[in-house]
Image (cartoon, rainbow, N blue to C red):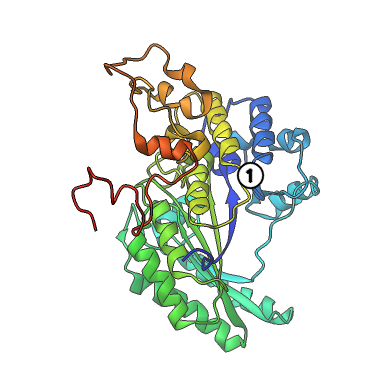
Amino acid sequence: MIGNWPKVIYKEEGMREGMQIEDANISVDDKVRLLDALSETGLKQIVVGSFVSPKWTPQMARIDEIVSRFTPRAGVTYTALALNERGVERAKQYSPPLSIERDKWPRLNCHMCDAFVRRNTNRSQMQEMERWPQIVAQAQERNVKEAGIGTNASWGSNFLGDFPVDSLMTMLDKQHQLWDEAGIKVTSVSMGDPMSWCRPDKVEDSVVRVKEKWPEVKHFRLHLHNGRNMAIASAYAALRVLEPEDTLEMDGTIGGFGGCPYCGNGRATGQAPTEDVMHMMDDMGIDTGVDVDKLIDCVWMAEEIIGRDLYGHVSKAGPRPTRDRLYDVNAPFVETMEQARHFKTGSKAYEGGIYPYREPVASPYRDRVDQGKPAFDDAGGEWPWKQDWFPVKD
């Protein structure tokens, strides 16, 4: 399967999605320090915050200072969320270094959950859909050739319950029909999940059904929340069924922090931890260009800034160790989270730990690995299959 994955475009949302639900008193200095560290990880797209009303999102009240003070890195695209024209105009003052993010496709979109969109934007699903004919007409005036369709709260809602994939497909089909009538080709589908109702089987089914129904759709955008620990599994499900000619846009946050005050789960909503997603894709043979070690430093920095542990796993247990970073077989017990950091901080992390072994641990397998050999030969090899002590020999 390596080499047959879709093109992946990944966006780091910690400075926006993460910080928007943390303490509003986190200092600008700390936020700039974290943003600068993120810029050094190899991430290609970073959201720096949002230009929104400080009345409802006081955590973003000092976004202007952050954008003025951070150090942009060449090759990184920096964006900010702006929900209305006023926000866009504010963001334009800082372009560059900000790129004013606009959807490449004119897109028909709505929330599957009418209750959530009313809580989130003081608008109804019906009001969202009322704009569709206007969006189509504007696209026709501009002689647009391609368009997108999409949903949010795509698979379920904390306020209304589960939404079958049939319902999602029907909503997308209604949008597709409007573009068909206008003679504009649909090539992009977005599916969002603000309330953590994604599930790998439903995400896979949704992507497969879109591809089967509309083969010309080659661009997929997934915004997955992780309140029920399904975001990474759901992302993998999408990666598994997409093809090299497809593009998958995803996002997440370092440490998996973030949340929405409107969804009912607060900080527990979270997103897929960026370091875990990058680690998974690296192991799968998808070139991310990201230094997971530096991402882990950013997670630790974020935890220090917000004053608590975050939700990712690679930042705690470490990446799967490569040959030159295998654990010491004679390490003492490693029990605490602090001791587990030895994968980055070295043996001092577990100094003084319990050592129950009567004599040093030794293994002929580890001897082979230290000599640059594989732990096991292949099936037709000698080691360990043809050793005298191996119970079954050819």
Q: Quadrant of the C terminus?
A: bottom left
Q: Residues within 10 Å of mark 1 (few under 14, many from 20)?
A: many
Q: From the viewer's perspective, tell me whether residue 340 is left or right of residue 88.
A: left
Residue 388 figure quarter: top left
Q: Position of residue 361 (x, y in %)?
A: 33, 25
Q: From the viewer's perspective, tell me whether residue 378 is left or right of residue 124.
A: left
Q: Is residue 55 visible?
A: no
Does 326 appear above or below 120? above
Q: Position of residue 383 (x, y in %)?
A: 34, 48
Does 361 appear above or below 210? above
- Residue wearing tag 1: 52
Residue at image coords 58%, 54%: 10
Residue at image coords 51%, 70%: 129
Does 59 appear above or below 216? above
* Element marked by disc 1: loop
Tell me the amino acid under the disc marked 1.
Val
132 or 148, nearer to the observer: 148
Residue 139 figure quarter: bottom right
Q: Position of residue 334 (x, y in %)?
A: 36, 23
Q: How many marks?
A: 1
- Outermost residue toward the top in this view: 352
